[in-house]
Amino acid sequence: MSNLNRRQLAAALSAGALSASPILHAQEQPAAGDELNAARAQLRETAAQLDKFPLPMAVEPATTFKP
Amino acid sequence: MPIPEDIFFASITEINQKLTKRDLSAAELARAFSDRLEAIGPRYNALALSLHKDALRDAKDVDGDIKRERLRGPLQGIPYGAKDLLAYAKHPTTWGAKPYADQVFDYTASALKRIQKHGGLLTGKLAMVELAGGPSYRFATASMTGPGLNPWDTTRWSGGSSSGSAIAVAAGLVTYALGSETSGSILTPSAFCGVTGLRPTYGLVSRHGAMALSWTLDKIGPICRSAEDCGLVLEAIAGGDYEDPASSHKSFYYTPQFARDLKDVRVGYAPVDFNDAVDPAARADYAKALETIKSLGVQVTEAKMPEFPYGPVIGTIISSEGSAVFEPLITSGRVDQLADQHQIAGLKAGLEIPAKEYLKAMRIRALIQESFRDLLSTIDVLIAPTRFDPAPKITQPLDRPASDRPMPADPGLRALIPAGNLAGLPALSLPCGFANGMPMGLQLVGTPFSENLLLAIGKTFQDRTDWHKRRPPVTSG
């Protein structure tokens, strides 16, 4: 992983690009700061995917979980 | 006289019959199973805490009860294990995580108390992925006890987060175990280890005394050798509990004798799941499994999942709720003691998720629940491979696709695990074959509180197959 910059690491860790990323080994965990940036990038990607979903204004959050 | 090896792989009913006929004593069973769990459990990183002494003490009480013909049902005197996310009073409950290594509660989880009332013998707390996986983790090593090693091949992972529970059942270290699922943590290790796992309807089993990861998703359920055993355990642990705000206050009675006529049951599946989507080495066994399901006389029909961004929705909910649960751990800095860097970063980042993102995920979730209500008004049970690939190698990163096999454009029912969890639906995973020597599972998902139907199909399937009776190459020496 040491050859990847932060942006590449974030891209590699995002769901869409994972299959193209090099295999990570347990001994090769990225530095903590890079990992946090990648996690934030992942959350931004996830939010973008949710944003693409059309939600009518009338839809209320699920609040009842007792089916 | 040593206990015969077959006892370690016997069903709950078989062992209970031997106890009530006094062919065996509960004390003999407790001693033999505890010794085996202590000797073999660590080989697979499956054991968090042996409860040998407690089990022997309880076994003596059970033997006294049986002698006086005070019979308490099929779980009486049966050794079992519990995922180390369930509190057991005055003993460590670590949640698989180093920051909680010394944590001790002064109360016992409701599910364990219910089994105690039935005379069950808790022989050990079983290993798990740290914090039940948190928002996500990259490596199988994400556990204080090390990676769960698969009894079928110790170079492969057991699956998680109920790792030790599935390993212990597969290797004959306990007769059954309790696990928990937020999204796949009962079904996945059950499939990877070749055992039968039941994820109950949300709210059916009390989570009081269980670690919270996601208040709106967490469930407690059994991992067993057969669907029948799952029914017996669920009957004991299900039921209302005012200590759990999510409790549905419903009971469950395992009544296979009153199961619906299978001719009236509509089973939906996606053909692509059993062909191009699943590991090629498992396709022949999946084709046979599908034929077996059809031979039960059910009405089989093709099914399509409603289209939703299941992964992002469940990911946002688990990250938001999980980071809120563990905020004190994160802000104190002790989160850095966790084993998996990916999980540490995910927990920290999860605290930054805006409320609007969480609410958006919950609004989409409401639509998912509604869509599944519609789908399951025309189909009673959905079936699909539990996982589409066998257990990965221990070193394989888990936050990327399990194989480089191209996935077909047709999504089939591949998102059934997150979808079923978001909708609060029950699911049963049955062993149904092998891929290159590793077990594969078939999942059945039904309407809320349809556990008896899932179990009836599972039991009939297991009456006609023997995948659930296969044993991994475990040696006791």
Image (tube, coloured by chain):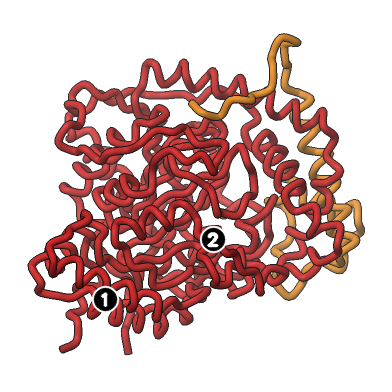
Residue beneath the point at 56% across and 44% down: B218
What quarter of the picture does the C terminus of chain B occupy? bottom left
| Amino acid identity at mark 2 | Tyr
Q: Which chain is red?
A: B
| Amino acid identity at mark 1 | Lys
Mark 2 and mark 1 lie on one chain; the one further toward the N terminus is 1
Which of B440/B423 is in front? B423
Answer with left or right where residue B289 lies relative to residue A35.
left
Q: Which SS class for mark 2?
A: loop
Which of B62/B250 is in front? B62
- Where does the image place residue B470, in percent across and percent down from the top left? 26, 64
Residue beneath the point at 84% across and 56% down: A9
Which of B237/B350 is in front? B237
Residue B60: give its label.
Answer: 1
As drawn, the residue found furthest toward the front would be B68
Does residue A53 appear in the picture of this structure? yes
Subunit under mark 1: B
Residue identified by numbered label 2: B107
Q: Which SS class for mark 1?
A: helix
B336 vs A47: above or below: below
Chain A's colour is orange
What quarter of the picture does the N terminus of chain B occupy? bottom left
- Tell me how far mark 2 sits from mark 1, CA to CA: 23 Å
Which of B224/B105 is in front? B105
B48 vs B287: above or below: below
Answer with left or right where residue B44 lies relative to residue B76.
right
B57 vs B85: above or below: below
